[in-house]
Image (cartoon, rainbow, N blue to C red):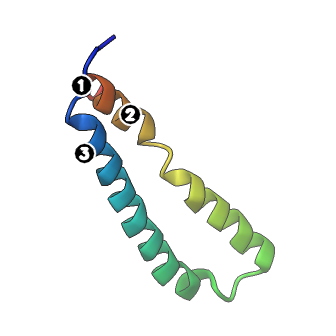
């Protein structure tokens, strides 16, 4: 356990917020054009999946913020 904060935590938080904002803008911009005519239930499932995809790299990112290693 570390006793003092590292630079990785604030950089990681700002990086995460930036990447999530870019991801959200890209999804909001391009997804409706691609799936806008599909049935509502299918669109709902796709948006749920897209909303959860960003969680996949989050574990390794949080490990890096805490330890400085990616694995």
Residue 17: horizontal and vertical position, in percent? 38, 56
Cα–Cα gap, marks 3 and 2: 12 Å
Give the structural element (helix, strand or loop) at label 1. loop
Q: Which quadrant, please, contains the N terminus?
A: top left
Report the front residue among 44 and 59.
59
Residue 20: horizontal and vertical position, in percent? 42, 60
Q: Residues within 10 Å of mark 3 (few under 14, many from 20)?
A: few
Q: Residues within 10 Å of mark 1 (few under 14, many from 20)?
A: few
Left or right of 49 on screen, residue 23: left
Cα–Cα gap, marks 3 and 1: 15 Å
In this picture, is 30 found above or below 21? below
Question: Closer to the camera: disc 3 or disc 2?
Answer: 3
Give the mark nearer the N terminus: 1 vs 2. Answer: 2
Residue, disc 2: 62
In this picture, is 54 found above or below 18? above
Give the structural element (helix, strand or loop) at label 2. helix
Cα–Cα gap, marks 1 and 2: 10 Å
Q: Residues within 10 Å of mark 2 (few under 14, many from 20)?
A: some
Give the structural element (helix, strand or loop) at label 3. helix
Give the mark nearer the N terminus: 3 vs 2. Answer: 3
Residue farthest along the top direction in this orientation? 1
Residue 70: horizontal and vertical position, in percent? 27, 29
Report the front residue among 13 and 27.
13
Q: Residue sitting at 35 percent across and 46 percent down?
A: 13
CB under 8 Å between discs 3 and 1: no
Q: Residue sitting at 35 percent across and 28 percent down?
A: 63
In this picture, is 33 found above or below 45? below
Residue, disc 1: 69
Q: Residue sitting at 57 percent across and 84 percent down?
A: 32
Residue 33: horizontal and vertical position, in percent? 54, 88
Residue, disc 3: 11
Question: Closer to the camera: disc 3 or disc 1?
Answer: 3
């Amino acid at each position: 356990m570390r006793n003092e904060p590292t630079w990785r935590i604030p950089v990681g938080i700002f990086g995460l917020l930036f990447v999530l904002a870019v991801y959200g803008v890209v999804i909001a911009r391009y997804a409706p054009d691609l799936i806008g005519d599909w049935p509502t239930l299918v669109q709902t499932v796709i948006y749920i999946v897209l909303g959860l995809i960003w969680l996949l790299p989050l574990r390794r990112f949080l490990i890096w913020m805490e330890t400085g290693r990616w694995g």
